[in-house]
Image (cartoon, coloured by chain):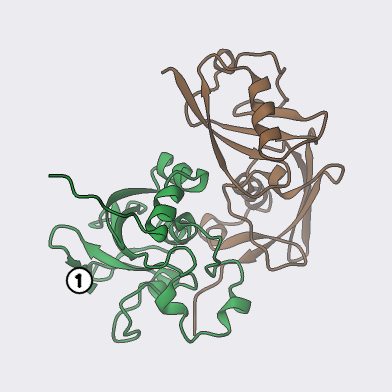
Chain colours: A green, B brown
Amino acid sequence: MSVAQTVLPDERRFRGDLESGAYLLGAALRRWRLLRIGWPHALIAVSAAPRPNAPAEFVLRFDLTGYPQAAPTARLWDDATNTELPENRWPAGTRVSCVFRPRAQWPKPCLYLPCDRMSAEGHTDWPQQYAGEIWKPDSTIAHYLNQVSELLMSSDYTGLCHA
Amino acid sequence: MNELQLFLQIEGVRRIEVIKLSADATAELLLHEARRLGLAAEEVLIFVDGRDEPVALDIVLREIGVGHHHHVHAHRCRSIEVTVHFNATTKKRAFTPHATVAQVKAWFVHAIEMPPLDAGEHVLQLTGTQDRPETDLHLGTLAQHPHCAIDFTLVPKKRVEG
């Protein structure tokens, strides 16, 4: 039996942005790949530069409620266990560890990025300080993914926390 | 493959468009797409991956090596005069409109012999602004005829703090 489902405007917009040039370019360059959508969540794997004993990609679990008027928020995810990725398997570096902050330093379950909804809460100076990085209502998911991809492909990324 | 999916960027518009053309499409169809996307001017030139000169409009894209997921550009400037500053150093060079921001940075850090690790921690910013264009953007998206020039400053990447 088929069940009629209503696609909400935020999901419709998100799925439309998966066909945008910025998203498809990143996918064509293998910077990221969509694993699956279970609205309001989406799992997207972001490729990382090769490092000893580190994975080729990290999975982000996005909460896209209210997209794109509301910014996405994301955390690292273990797709095999369907739980948050343990901290000893988080990516590390100087700039990288500022974004993937251990919970002892940053209790919210999200990346510490100006374009992240949860991170941006309370940071009233970020729109001025990080004007190019913050989320705007006309941003697309590629804006968030590009910032994560840049970090994971940078020379600053050194591998996993525990290594 | 019967259809080409191409990434099109046009003069003065910071957006990467995906267009689908038949495999036997000519460059003139790219011009039509550019006009449909808002580049209404006459004398628009079409640039494709791997060629520094604009292509003839009647040429079949496939016959000059344009393939799936290649990049194309529509612009009135034949070249863009790029200036990059870093501390007391300034360098200039002409690029095609379909050169990317990433290509300019690669040229500049090589020209000033910046070590790769340091280069990775810097980014191009439009001089006099806080605007750091995405590295995938073509230069032509940042310049509009008749001002076929861009002025960048190489600056350190920001660490998210606070």
* Secondary structure category for the residue under label 1: loop
What residue appears at the point 25 percent right and 55 percent down from the top-left corner?
A55
Q: Which residue is mark 1?
A: A86
Q: Chain of mark 1?
A: A
Q: Quadrant of residue B140?
A: top right
Residue closest to the far right: B146
> In this picture, is B133 found above or below B64?
below
What residue appears at the point 42 percent right and 39 percent down from the top-left corner?
A28
- Along the horizontal axis of the image, is B136 left or right of B140? left
> In this picture, is B36 found above or below B86?
above
What residue appears at the point 49 percent right and 24 percent down from the top-left corner?
B4
Whether residue A23 appears in this view of the structure is yes
Please state the horizontal and vertical placement of residue B51, each as a whole percent of the image.
Answer: 65, 25
User: What amino acid type should be assigned to the residue bearing mark 1?
Assistant: Pro
> In this picture, is B27 found above or below A155?
above
Please state the horizontal and vertical placement of residue A140, each as a whole percent of the image.
Answer: 49, 57
Whether residue A51 appears in this view of the structure is no
